[in-house]
Image (tube, rainbow, N blue to C red):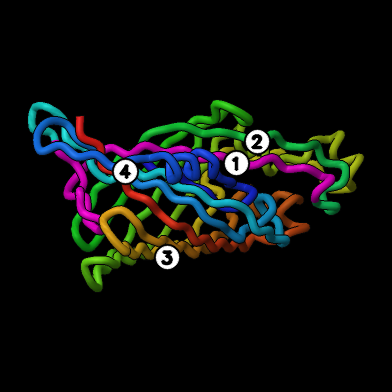
């Protein structure tokens, strides 16, 4: 499972990661079920909201499950600091989207504030040593009440035992509730803001690419950096909110990571 973040639009649950870094321990077992997961905390530089052309620095966090072994012979993932998942396997997916406030961005004057959202879901991926494909589906439990989906593929490079680099395309889909939350301009908002009224349909709202590199100093500690480019498309790109900003969205993050192995 991964906890993803991307600036204020996709902010982070950094306190959880920091707490785990500070108080987490490492345990192992020779036999029986086991799990390995990685937590991370750091900083990111991302757009203030979907479609913004202003950027801010904020906290970044990650929670990623790397390996699980269960009774009955089921084994998925890798226990190595830089390993790879072989074959098909389940994925968890969590995304926290920060609130959008007109008081923070004067160009949004007249638009209603958008509450923070928390999305939880599952996905499925296939991974080999040098490539992966995946798809995740989540539902907004807080904030917007809608389905969203992320899809992607990566080429994977492994220059040495401590370094892994992956690069590939991404595509994001949003349901009606999601699209209305971030791209709609109601009649009342139009009269207050001067923007044209606009009601988007569900559909793919973003395509882009992502570059990620992870380096492990040891079996427990490492550093991870990510750079991404996304372009808002479809009804998202046609939104007056995006037209006063930009379709092009960039993001950079750097995190210190801590891997924990649990035996039980």
Mark 2 surroundings: few (<14), some (14-19) or many (≥20) residues within 10 A: some
* Rendered location of residue 65, percent (x, y): 32, 42
- The residue labelled by disc 2 is 116
Q: Residue at x 26, y 42 (%)?
A: 261
Task: Determine whether 201 is above or below 155 in the image.
Answer: above
Point out the tag, 3 or 2, that comes first from the N-terminus: 2
Task: Determine whether 199 is above or below 169 in the image.
Answer: above
The CA span between labels 3 and 2 is 27 Å
At numbered mark 1, what does the secondary structure look like: helix, strand or loop?
Answer: strand
Mark 1 surroundings: few (<14), some (14-19) or many (≥20) residues within 10 A: many
Dot 3 and dot 2 residues touching (CB under 8 Å): no
The CA span between labels 1 and 2 is 6 Å
Q: Is residue 64 magenta?
A: no
- The residue labelled by disc 3 is 211
Q: Is residue 134 left or right of residue 177?
A: left
Task: Determine whether 164 is above or below 83 in the image.
Answer: below
Dot 1 and dot 2 residues touching (CB under 8 Å): yes
The CA span between labels 2 and 4 is 26 Å
- The residue labelled by disc 1 is 97
The magenta-colored residue range is 75-104
Numbered disc in front, either 2 or 4: 4
At numbered mark 4, what does the secondary structure look like: helix, strand or loop?
Answer: strand
Mark 4 surroundings: few (<14), some (14-19) or many (≥20) residues within 10 A: some
Q: Is residue 4 left or right of residue 30?
A: right
Point out the tag, 1 or 4, that comes first from the N-terminus: 4
The CA span between labels 1 and 4 is 23 Å
Q: Residue at x 64, y 42 (%)?
A: 98
* Rendered location of residue 5, percent (x, y): 52, 48
At numbered mark 2, what does the secondary structure look like: helix, strand or loop?
Answer: loop
């Amino acid at each position: 499972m991964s906890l993803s973040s991307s600036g204020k639009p996709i902010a982070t649950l950094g306190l959880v990661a920091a707490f785990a870094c500070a108080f987490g321990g490492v345990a192992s077992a020779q036999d029986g079920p086991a799990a390995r997961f990685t937590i991370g905390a750091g900083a990111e530089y991302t757009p203030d909201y979907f479609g913004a052309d202003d950027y801010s620095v904020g906290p970044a966090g990650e929670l990623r499950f790397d390996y699980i072994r269960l009774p009955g012979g089921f084994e998925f993932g890798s226990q190595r600091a830089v390993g790879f998942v072989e074959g098909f396997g389940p994925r968890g997916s969590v995304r926290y989207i920060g609130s959008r406030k007109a008081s923070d961005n004067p160009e949004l004057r007249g638009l209603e504030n958008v509450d923070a959202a928390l999305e939880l879901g599952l996905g499925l991926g296939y991974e080999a040593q040098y490539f992966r494909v995946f798809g995740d589906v989540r539902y907004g439990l807080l904030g917007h009440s809608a389905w969203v989906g992320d899809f992607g593929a990566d080429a994977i490079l492994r220059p040495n035992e401590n370094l892994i680099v992956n690069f590939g395309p991404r595509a994001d889909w949003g349901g009606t509730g999601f699209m209305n939350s971030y791209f709609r301009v109601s009649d009342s908002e139009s009269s207050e803001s001067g923007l044209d009224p606009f009601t988007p349909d569900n559909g793919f709202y973003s395509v882009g690419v992502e570059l990620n590199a992870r380096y492990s100093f040891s079996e427990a500690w490492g550093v991870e950096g990510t750079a991404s480019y996304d372009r808002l498309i479809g009804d998202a790109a046609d939104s007056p909110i995006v037209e006063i900003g930009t379709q092009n969205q960039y993001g950079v993050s750097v995190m210190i990571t801590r891997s924990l192995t649990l035996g039980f």
